[in-house]
Image (spheres, rainbow, N blue to C red):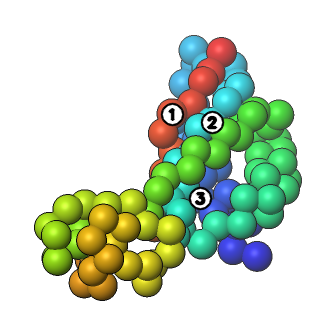
Amino acid sequence: MHEMSLCEGIRRVVDQAADRPDVARVTRVRLEIGKFAGVEKHALSFAWEVVMRGSKAEGATLDMIDLPGKALCYDCMKEVEIEERLSPCPDCGGGKLLPQGGDEMQIKDMEVV
């Protein structure tokens, strides 16, 4: 389950950002996850609860924001949203697509008190 190691990486970033005397605890973390990032959200939620124990983010809400898959179509020269990596262009039906997004995962922001 690579979601556990993903959460460990998130914890390092959150711990570093929250390592300030004016931050008592982290109450919410918003995470952007691309459609093609290969992240199992249920497993990530479980790992979140386990990995955040003992940190300033223990008990914090994890909000997962879905980002679409995007590609540049060389046939119609438009950036389009696609459902699967090998999907044809939804505008022109072309098959010459260069992925432009959807495999990212990043912390968008976090709330602290």
Query: Residue at coordinates 80% horizontally, 37% vertically from top-left?
Result: 58
Of circles 2 and 3, the one toward us is 2
Circle 2 residues within 10 Å: few <14, some 14–19, many ≥20: many
| Amino acid marked by disc 2 | Val
Q: Which image quadrant: the N terminus?
A: bottom right
Q: Are marks 2 and 3 in contact (CB under 8 Å)?
A: no
Would you name the residue on which mark 1 appears?
109
Q: CA distance from mark 2 to mark 1?
A: 6 Å
Would you name the residue on which mark 2 appears?
29
Residue 91 location in percent, x, y? 30, 65
Q: Are marks 2 and 1 in contact (CB under 8 Å)?
A: yes
Query: Residue at coordinates 71% horizontally, 26% vertically from top-left?
Result: 27
Q: Which sits in the foreground, 3 or 17?
A: 3
Q: Is residue 90 left or right of residue 33?
A: left
* Of pointers 2 and 1, the one earlier in the residue sequence: 2
Q: Is residue 4 left or right of residue 12?
A: right
Query: Residue at coordinates 78% horizontally, 52% vertically from top-left?
Result: 45
Would you name the residue on which mark 3 appears?
9
| 84, above or below 30, in the image | below
The secondary structure type at the circle numbered 3 is helix
| 32, above or below 19, in the image | below
Say which quarter of the image contains residue 9.
bottom right
Query: Residue at coordinates 39% horizontally, 60% vertically from top-left?
Result: 81
| Amino acid marked by disc 1 | Asp
Say which quarter of the image contains residue 4.
bottom right
